[in-house]
Every structure is written in structure tokens, then in C-alpha cells.
């Protein structure tokens, strides 16, 4: 669990700012939201998210909640999940939904994009086997398109269905008759979404916090 307890000091906040890209003011505000959500405890559990009305209608609500407890989102090469998280873990996951900085180098922007895509992939790779199914991929595409704000939900669904069929033809069309289709790997996921702008579409809103407004101001 995170090492930061009930009243983190300014040094703790600065460490978190350096790690996540949030400003000190944003971290203070998120800490207040964390304490509200945890009922003033030092850790959050899954059931604490059940009272968030903004998440209740989100079609991937379960995946979003589980992402906060997925060890892969805290430590590289980690597996499994935890039963509760501290503020540091909460902030780390929230940072994946934050829009990228405006003045990043191309190399840094590509690294951030890869991190966000890995996070998105992990959300749908629920059994941690390194692959997602075609249906899960269709759901990812539909969600990204729906969040663009310029495409109707039914249109997004139709495009997602077509995208799923295209991936199926690409990934399965060159298979031998005795080969078994294992799903979409992360490397293939990167290639499929090449050119799709996802950085600003990965956002959530709850507890009066909208991550679309949380670009870095340090």
C-alpha cells in the first residue's frame, strides 16, 4: 500500500507531483476527494466506489473500479490484485486518465501514449493472460469513439463492429487450419490503434473531479 497516511506533508505531495504529473493543488484536491470516498480512512476498498453516482451509468464501470486495484497499474511486471489501496495508488491510477501535457517532446508523448494504451489494455485483459478477445476489443473501440463527442453511440457501435471484423480477418486470416486463435496481444493492440488519438479520450468523472481539466500546470 502507499506509504502516505492521513495527513501527508508537502514533501509527500511533491513526490507524488513528480511521479504523476499532477500539480500540488490538484493533488491536495484529490486527497480531499480520496478522504471523502474512504470515509476519512487511509485506504479505499472496492465497495467504496459503489456509491459514486457518476460511475453508475458508465458501461465499463466494473473495469474502471477494478483498475484501481490491479497491481499491474502500480508496479511493472506485477500480477494479481489487492483488496485495498492507499492514496498513492489511487493517484497513480487517476494519472492515467489525465490529459497529456501540451509541451511534451515527441519521444515523451509516444511514451505517455504507450503507457495509456497499456493501462487500457490491462483494463480489458481481466484474466491477465496477455491477450484480449475480439469482443473486448470491439468494446474498447466503441468506448473511445463514443467519448469523441462528435459520433452518435449507434454510429460508434457500427464502426466498432466493423473494426472487430477487420481485426478478425487480419489476425485469423493467415492462420493454419490447426492453429488456435489466442486473442489480441498488446503489441498487436498497439498496431491496431496506431493513428487513433486516445490520449484525450481516456477520462473519468466522479466526486466532482473531471480529469479532462487536469492537464499539468507545474
Image (cartoon, rainbow, N blue to C red):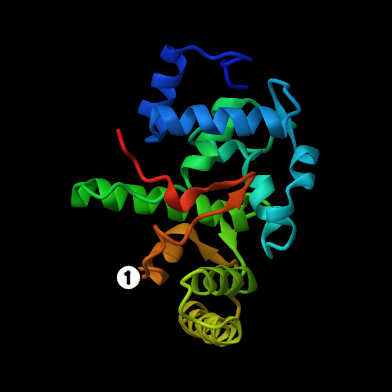
Residue at position x 69%, y 55% in the image: 55
Q: Residue at (43%, 65%) from the top-left corner? A: 188
Q: Which quarter of the rendering shows the C terminus? A: top left
Instruction: Classify 140 as above or below 62.
Output: below
Judge whether 63 appears above or below 215 on screen.
below
Write the residue at 20% across / 52% down: 106
The N terminus: image quadrant: top right
Neighbours of disc 1 within 10 Å: few (<14), some (14-19), many (20+): few
Q: Foreground residue, 99 or 172?
A: 99
Instruction: Tell me residue 116's x, y (percent).
Output: 44, 51
Between 25 and 169, which is closer to the camera in this rendering? 25
76 is higher (above) or lower (below) than 100: above
Residue 12 in view of the camera: yes
> In the rendered image, which residue does mark 1 sit on?
195
Compare residues 92 and 83 and report the one nearer the observer. 92
Residue found 54% across the figure and 73% down from its top:
146
Percent across and percent down for residue 108 are 25, 45
Amino acid at each position: 500500500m502507499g506509504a502516505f497516511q492521513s495527513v501527508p506533508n508537502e514533501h509527500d505531495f511533491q513526490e507524488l507531483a513528480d511521479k504523476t504529473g499532477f500539480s500540488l493543488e490538484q493533488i491536495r484536491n484529490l486527497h480531499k476527494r480520496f478522504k471523502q470516498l474512504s470515509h476519512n480512512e487511509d485506504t479505499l476498498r472496492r465497495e467504496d466506489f459503489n456509491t459514486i453516482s457518476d460511475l453508475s451509468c458508465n458501461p465499463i464501470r466494473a473495469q474502471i473500479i477494478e483498475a484501481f486495484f490491479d497491481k499491474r497499474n502500480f508496479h511493472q511486471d506485477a500480477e494479481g490484485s489487492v483488496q485495498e489501496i492507499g492514496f498513492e495508488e489511487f493517484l497513480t491510477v487517476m494519472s492515467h486518465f489525465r490529459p497529456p501535457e501540451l509541451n511534451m517532446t515527441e519521444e515523451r508523448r509516444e511514451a505517455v501514449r504507450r503507457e495509456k494504451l497499456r493501462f487500457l489494455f490491462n483494463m480489458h485483459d481481466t484474466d491477465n493472460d496477455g491477450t484480449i478477445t475480439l469482443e473486448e476489443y470491439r468494446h474498447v473501440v466503441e468506448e473511445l469513439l463514443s467519448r469523441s463527442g462528435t459520433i452518435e453511440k449507434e454510429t460508434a457501435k457500427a464502426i466498432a463492429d466493423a473494426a472487430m471484423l477487420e481485426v478478425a480477418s487480419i489476425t485469423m486470416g493467415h492462420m493454419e487450419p490447426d492453429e488456435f486463435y489466442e486473442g489480441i496481444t498488446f503489441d498487436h493492440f498497439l498496431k491496431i490503434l496506431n493513428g487513433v488519438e486516445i490520449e484525450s479520450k481516456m477520462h473519468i468523472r466522479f466526486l466532482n473531479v473531471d480529469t479532462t481539466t487536469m492537464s499539468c500546470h507545474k
